[in-house]
Amino acid sequence: MRVEQLYTGCLAEAAYYIESEGEALVIDPLRETEPYIERAKADGATIKYVLETHFHADFVSGHLDLAKQTGATIVYGPTAQPNFKAHVATDGEVLHVGKISIVVLHTPGHTMESTTYLLRDENGKDYAIFTGDTLFLGDVGRPDLAIKSNLTREDLAGYLFDSLRNKIMPLADEVIVYPGHGAGSACGKKMSKETQGKLGDQKKLNYALRADMTREEFIKEVTTGLVEPPQYFPKNAVMNKMGYESIEVVRERGSQPLSVRAFKAAWEGEHALVLDTRHQTEFIKGFIPGSIFIGVDGSFAPWVGALITDLKQPILIVAEPGREDEVVVRLARVGYDNPIGFLEGGFQAWKDAGEEVDVLEEWTPEMLANQFDGKNLRVLDVRKASEYNAEHILGATSFPLDFINRNMNDLKPENQYILYCATGYRSVIAGSILKARGISDVVNIPGGFEKLSETPLKRTEFREQVTEL
């Protein structure tokens, strides 16, 4: 028996490949199928099942393409109603793969179809649970992401309480917990950075598994402090339930090289968004006016999902040469299936053609410290509200990147705005958006709050209201 976790840091997502005696299964695969098919080929194994723990909201699963390419059966837990051929298992049903078995444990709460898969080894001993978004290390799944349900989040939290107490906590302490996500995912609140652990440790350390916890206490704790989910979550959940276009078609469409002339024609003719995915240090030195920066080396997919509101938006890509297909795949992971090509030769080709170029001005933290007294400059802190409330530069205004589309009307095109985040990635994204929407005087602080905190600028942990932007 072989169990392999395939962890994707950008999405804080874990897929699993399990093989025994020439048969294999995959749990919660990402959109691209090569990693799983290549592993099975190396093992001389046939992928028999693709197990889905629920209809995912934070990424588009690869279940449909993987099943089509391998002949595997897609499996969901009870109550799931997918719009495609799949086996909807019953609670307690046993699936056999080689010499191992998988027990289907219906664990509603995160969503009503949420299911945990219990792996039993060759000797029939409980070995591990694959919990999806039901149980994380240090946390449990949030109960407010179900697709169009009449149930409240309190109702779902109640189901989750029962699922944990009746299906998971009775298992032995030595059972390994393999969750669907780790720290950084928006599917929970307090996830550990660890990506696997023992159930016994969770019974001791996870706030939601306290033995003396009442149902009412659980519901209150699980539903308190939930922030608004990213706007693409319900859209991805619908894609996972209803089906989607093959990723191979998406890759072919998005990997079309375009000359500068063809790129400009597509931009105008298709009303496309130009997405620059280079590193922020390269973007600030020169970029296509009107383009939006989201660097592929940062938390690319979640920020695309948070900021580009239309999954069908035609997208033109500016990338480092050789990384165009990577960008297309990572867009598809969160449901953006309409990239229509990339600038052949990258940004250098645009410059060589003599086209107009814009830059993003930067000040060092010391330059800001020398000019800023908390009143005479408009400084925007684009970190999350929780980061701002913990500590920020005195006089800076909270302007979270997460909600920039909602708050843009608060800014005035004639004003200058100075932006900082934690390290410099998010502030460059925000700066590119301000520029694209007609605010020309934008300044970025490289190094962000980490560097600013080393200067004489005053900091405070108390939120200060600055109303005039």
Image (tube, rainbow, N blue to C red):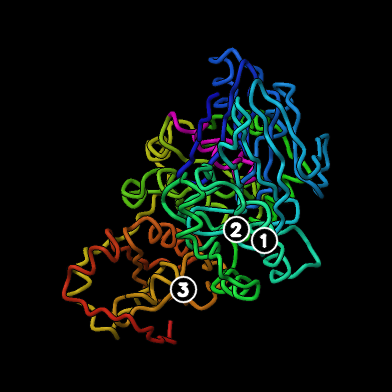
Circle nearer the N terminus (2, 1): 2
Which residue is pictured at 61% across the width and 62% down the height?
142
Residue carrying label 1:
160
SS for tag 2? Answer: loop
The N terminus - image quarter = top right
Q: Which residues are magenta?
A: 322-343
Marks 2 and 1 in Cβ contact (< 8 Å): yes
Q: What amino acid type is highlighted by mark number 2?
A: Gly
Dot 1, how many residues are within 10 Å of its Cα: few (below 14), some (14-19), or many (20+)?
many
Q: Vertically, is 38 above or below 456?
A: above
Q: Vertically, is 336 above or below 35?
A: below
Q: Vertically, is 301 above or below 407?
A: above
Q: Nearer the viewer, residue 187 or 175?
A: 175
Left or right: 328 in relation to 467: right
Residue carrying label 3:
413
Q: Which mark is residue 174?
A: none
**Which label sits in the foreground, 1 or 3?**
1
Q: Quadrant of residue 316?
A: top right
Q: Position of residue 172 (x, y in %)?
A: 56, 46
Residue carrying label 2:
141
Circle nearer the N terminus (1, 3): 1
Give the distance between the C-alpha atoms of the residues marked 2 and 1, in whole angstroms. Answer: 8 Å
Which residue is pictured at 67% across the width and 24% down the height?
97
Asked if residue 338 lies in the magenta stretch, the reply is: yes
Q: What amino acid type is highlighted by mark number 3?
A: Pro
Left or right: 47 in relation to 186: right
Q: Quadrant of residue 148?
A: bottom right
Q: Nearer the viewer, residue 359 or 89?
A: 89
